[in-house]
Image (cartoon, grey):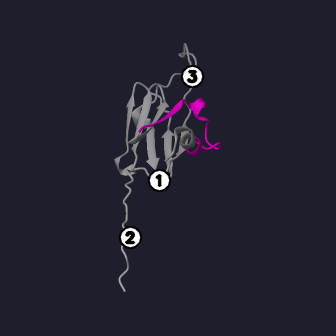
Amino acid sequence: MYHFHNLWTHMVSNQYPRAEDEHIKLKENNNLYIISLNILGVKMTDIQLEATDDILNIKISSSTDVNLNEAQLLWKEFNMPNRDHQIRLPKGIDLDHASAQLNDGILKINIPKIQLYKKVISIKQATS
C-alpha cells in the first residue's frame, strides 16, 4: 500500500510543474485519492480531464469573456495562461468511478481505490 509521501513522490514527476507552485494537494483515505487544484477564475468549460491507467491529464485553457484594449483596462492582476498538469496515478485505482467538481475555484478530483481482497488458499493432500 502506498503511503502519502511515497504516493506523492511517485505521482508528481520532476518533469511536470512542482506541486507547491501550482497549488496542487493530494490526500488519501482508505477508499479514495483526492486531488485538489487551485484554479481560481477558470470556468468549468475551460477544463478538460483525461485519464489513462497511469496518468491524469488536466488541461486548462484560458478564455476571456470581454476583450478590452489597453485604453479601457484599468487594472490587471494576473493573466491566466493555458496550463497542462500531468499527475502519475498509482496502481489499484478505479477510473470508471472517478469524479470531479469545481467549487469556488477549487477543482476536486476523487479517484476511488480498488479494494483488494486476500483469499487464503487451502492446500490439500495429494491422493496417490
Q: Is residue 62 left or right of residue 115?
A: right
Q: Nearer the viewer, residue 47 or 37?
A: 37
- Nearer the observer, disc 3 or disc 2? 2
Q: Residues within 10 Å of mark 2 (few under 14, many from 20)?
A: few
Q: CA distance from mark 2 to mark 1?
A: 39 Å
Q: Over which residues does the magenta segment extend?
A: 9-29
Mark sitting on residue 123:
2
Q: Which circle's residue, 3 or 2, is located before the other in the chain? A: 3
Q: Which residue is mark 1?
A: 52
Q: CA distance from mark 3 to mark 2?
A: 67 Å
Element marked by disc 1? loop
Q: Amino acid at mark 3?
A: Phe
Spot occupied by residue 82 in the image (x, y as percentages of width and height): 54, 36
Q: Which residue is mark 3?
A: 78
Q: Is residue 7 left or right of residue 44?
A: right
Spot occupied by residue 123 in the image (x, y as percentages of width and height): 38, 70
Query: What is the residue that sits farthest to the top in this orientation?
Result: 74
Q: Is residue 110 left or right of residue 1?
A: left
